[in-house]
Image (cartoon, rainbow, N blue to C red):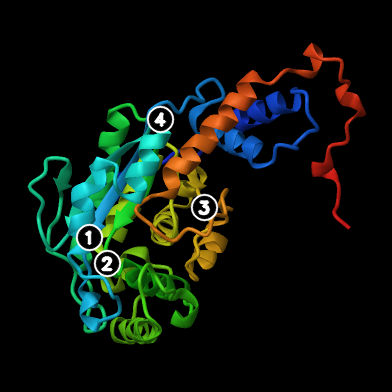
Amino acid sequence: MNILENTLNSIKPVSEEEGKRAKLFWDSLAHPPGSLGALEEMTVRLAKIKGFDNLKIDKKITAVFCADNGVYAEKITSQPQITTFLLAEIMHTGKTGLGTISKWAGSGIRVYDVGMIKTSERKDVINKKIKFGTENIAQGPAMSREDCIRMIETGIEAAFEIADEGFDIAGIGELGICNTTTTAAVLSGLCGVEPKLTVGRGASTTEAMYELKIKSVKKAIEINAPKKGDSIDCISKVGGFDIAAMCGCYIGLAARGIPAVIDGYISSLAALCAVNLNPRVRDYLFASHKSEERGAKICTAELGIEPVLNMKMRLGEGSGCPLLFKMLEGAVFTMQNMGKFTETMIDGADLVDIRKQTNP
């Protein structure tokens, strides 16, 4: 617990002053103030984290936390459980969704086994597991509170390694059959929301399986009674090792002043768990895309961070992260290369700042 407590206590507030510098710089550029929308907003937030004079995001990586879930026994997916392992094995080949997009984006991938049912012999699948998957949440708690904290601290350590290697930004992804089920269960417990509002179809679910999925989450909540607002209690009772490690990684990145990119539903739920443990984590987060999963809207609302992209994605893996890396690169490039009003014939005084106007 010392690692977790010490790391949570070490997270510093972002610099509002550096954000103001970035905003003033944007307002000096030859365009209607605020007209580049999210491009401007992202760089202002990036400046708050990294400083206005240090906006580079040259070295990028997505950390992928892989784990299996005991709730698979409830027959709520058409995919075999070994799929988690099989995808982890080829993640570095560039043949998966995340792998291909990362190759195009020029970003790295780091794969962690935090609880798969089978152990890889590959050196690039880093073995950090303490057990071969969780217990079935529809029958009892997923893991002990102690194991949950241990796995959160594993995620913190992964974040520290990323920071020590000089990465400018990191995305958080996952692999795990049935982890949309555990995510829905944690969100239901954490926010006190009915499972019918948090359970989606995941990656591969028939209508009958979908109904079973809702019933399984309801049963998990009834049996385990996760405490509303308690991230550790909710993850340990109805979550997964991947969610715990991802939660820890967000905390660790914030503690080291590294911006972190959220992928989809599972990634955003882990981010919400981290924010609940220390609200300062929120200021270090960027949401990449609007997930098609039902509960993702609740996560977005609770986090108060609007996803930049809306591409009807539901793959997971961290696939949205390298897409946002490129958007951030584009935003920084635009900011640093646009001409100023003083360099053009345009009089900035003639432009209305629509950000100050009230919509009818």
Label 3 is placed on what type of residue? His
* CA distance separating discs 4 and 3: 20 Å
* 347 vs 50: above or below: above
- Measured as percent of width and height from the top left, residue 236 is found at 26, 68
Does residue 323 appear in the picture of this structure?
A: yes
Dots 2, 3 in contact, CB < 8 A: no
Residue drawn at the location 39% of the way across and 70% of the way down? 202
Residue drawn at the location 22% of the way across and 84% of the way down? 139
- Measured as percent of width and height from the top left, residue 247 is found at 34, 54
Label 3 neighbour load within 10 Å: few <14, some 14-19, many 20+: many
Classify mark 4: helix, strand or loop: loop
Q: Which residue corresponds to mark 3?
A: 289
Q: Which residue corresponds to mark 1?
A: 84
- Badge 4 or badge 3: first in the primary sequence: 4
Dots 4, 3 in contact, CB < 8 A: no
* 220 vs 303: above or below: below
Query: Is residue 18 left or right of 7 when viewed as pictured?
Result: right
* CA distance separating discs 1 and 2: 6 Å
Classify mark 1: helix, strand or loop: helix
Q: Which residue corresponds to mark 4?
A: 168
Q: In which quarter of the image is residue 145?
A: bottom left
- Badge 1 or badge 4: first in the primary sequence: 1
Residue drawn at the location 57% of the way across and 62% of the way down? 301
Label 2 is placed on what type of residue? Ile
* CA distance separating discs 1 and 4: 28 Å
Label 4 is placed on what type of residue? Asp
- Badge 2 or badge 4: first in the primary sequence: 4
* CA distance separating discs 2 and 4: 30 Å
Dots 1, 2 in contact, CB < 8 A: yes
